[in-house]
Every structure is written in structure tokens, then in C-alpha cells.
Image (spheres, rainbow, N blue to C red):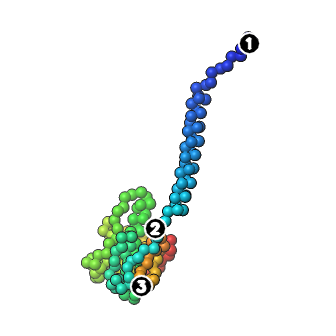
Amino acid sequence: MNHTPVSKPSPILRELTFPKRGLAIALLLLGFAALFGVALDAAWPTTTSVVSAGSVSDLKTNTPVHNSHGFYAVKLADGDIIALSDQDPHGYFARFLGTPYTCEIQWRSDFKFDGKTGWFRDNCTGSTFTLNGTKVFGPSPRSMDRYAVRVQDSEVLVDTTRVSQCTAADAADPSSLVCVPR
């Protein structure tokens, strides 16, 4: 009887079949997880980005009110209502670079600077801002960011996804603030 010798399979080939099979299973599971995530995202109600800052009558002129959503609601002397981010723009840059930055801008009604009392101030960097958010001192690259505000039925509504970056057009005139949506 003629017998053709058959060589034993190479151990390398046997070792390659498991990783290929494992990779296929991992990719299949990843695909199911992605589909599940998309379905869950579509079915689950999302939180709104528009939050209430209270009623217009609750806001006192030139007295910022800090909100738990990360902004100050300010009723200016001319009646305009603005919402200023409590994060120093300098901090956005620091977080982008991966450095820890946990300070937020605070309203300091007792802080005296340039002959006036009452300023926004970042105690970590020393950046100082006027009541309308204009930068007047410090390493911050620009004025405080603003959120879009609208008044509906005497309620102040702030859209925390619509942010504008602000810069004073004239450094000598803090009221010359120019804001550009980002």
C-alpha cells in the first residue's frame, strides 16, 4: 500500500487561527456595541442645553448671580441681561494642553481695582474682568465667554451650547466689547 506522507501542520499556523478568530469576534462585538449605543442614544431623552436663570425680576441690576450650570446671569444698568461663563478662557487653553486647571472666575463685590469696587476675578491667574465680562488685567487671552440669552414670559433662558468669544475692540474702552460665536 502506497502511503503518501503528510507533514504535521506547522505550530505557527495553529497559533494564527486563534488570533484571527478572536479578532473577528472582537470586531463583531464592537459592531453590536456601536449599534446598541446608537439605538440607546436615539431612544433616550437628552437633557436640554437651555436652562433657566430665573425671572427677570429676580435679577438685581449690576449684581451677578452664579448658576450651577457654570455661568453668571447679569442684569446690566441699561437693562440688558447677559450670561458669562465662569471659566477663564486661559483655563480652556490649559485644559487643552492637559494640565490640571480647576479654578473658576468668581464675582468679588469687595475687590478693589483701578479705583472701583466689584470685579470678576480668577484667583488662580489673577485675570480681572468688568461687570460685562471685559478683560482688564491678567494672562487671560480674551474677555469672558458669553452664552446666548433670551427672555420668554419674563423668564431668563440661557443656551449653554451657544458660546461667543469676546474681546474688547479698544483696550482703553471696556465697553467696546465685540463677541463672535464660536
Question: Residue 104, located in which quarter of the rendered image?
Answer: bottom left
> Picture coordinates of residue 95 (x, y %)?
41, 61
Q: Residues within 10 Å of mark 3 (few under 14, many from 20)?
A: few
State the residue position of label 2: 47
Q: Is residue 130 above or below residue 94?
A: below
Task: Return the disc, 1 or 3, that comes first in the chain's sequence.
Answer: 1
Mark 2 lies on a secondary structure that is loop
Q: Is residue 93 above or below residue 55?
A: above
Give the residue displayed 42% in from the left and 57% down from the top. Answer: 98
State the residue position of label 3: 154
State the mark number for residue 2.
1
Q: Residues within 10 Å of mark 1 (few under 14, many from 20)?
A: few
Is 42 left or right of 54, judged from the image as shown?
Answer: right
Q: Is residue 6 above or below residue 94?
A: above
Quadrant of the drawing holding the N terminus: top right
Task: Return the disc, 3 or 2, that comes first in the chain's sequence.
Answer: 2
